[in-house]
Image: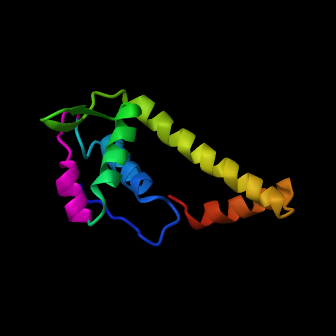
Amino acid sequence: MSIIINNSSMVPVYEQLMAQIKQAIISGELAEGAVLPSVRNLSAELRISALTVKKAYDRLEEEGFVVTVHGKGTYVAATDRQLAVEARRKAVEDEMDAVVLKARAVGLDDEEIRDILEILLSEHQL
């Protein structure tokens, strides 16, 4: 698993870390029962605070993606893949909601918002 932290991003580092670990779990790159790097090792490797890694791991545990066994490590939890996909969908919806609010705040109407979305979708075709 390769994790890349963008220090110039407006997204907090722990959220970047969480998103990449979630993606690795959902994609199957990290299988059920796989051990994650220790907090110390990952913080040293990424050159970030151990508290940041701990926060990410704690949040992932709260969301049911990982399980921490004290003294042993943090492992990928046995998760329902559909639950993981739904969590990602919810995150996208939340981000889109914020974008719509921002668009409304600058005076864009429904048609203008749809036009922008159509342009972006055409630029990012699968």
Q: Residue at x 53, y 41 (%)?
A: 89
126 in relation to 67, above or below? below
The part of the chain drawn in magenta is: 32-46
Q: Report the residue at 27% width, 55% height from top.
A: 50
Taking the magenta stretch, the answer to whether it contains residue 34 is: yes
Q: Is residue 27 magenta?
A: no
Residue 58 position, x and y percent, is 35, 39
x%, y% of residue 29? Answer: 25, 46
Position of 104 compared to 33: left or right? Answer: right
Please, which residue is most extreme toward the left here? 72
Q: Quadrant of residue 122?
A: bottom right
Residue 15 lies, with reference to residue 4, above or below; the image says above
Q: Is residue 51 above or below residue 59?
A: below
Task: State the residue in front, 24 or 6.
Answer: 6
Q: Quadrant of residue 111?
A: bottom right
Query: Left of 18 or right of it: where is 97?
Result: right
In this figure, which colouring scheme has been used for the structure?
Answer: rainbow
| Quadrant containing the N terminus in the rendered view | bottom left
In the rendered view, would you say 20 is above or below 77? below
Residue 85 x, y percent position in the rendering: 45, 37
- Most foreground residue, 16 or 55: 55
Q: Does residue 59 appear to the left or right of 2 in the view shown?
A: right
Q: How many marks?
A: 0
Residue 86: give x, y in percent of width and height.
50, 34
Residue drawn where x is 18% and y is 49% of the image: 37
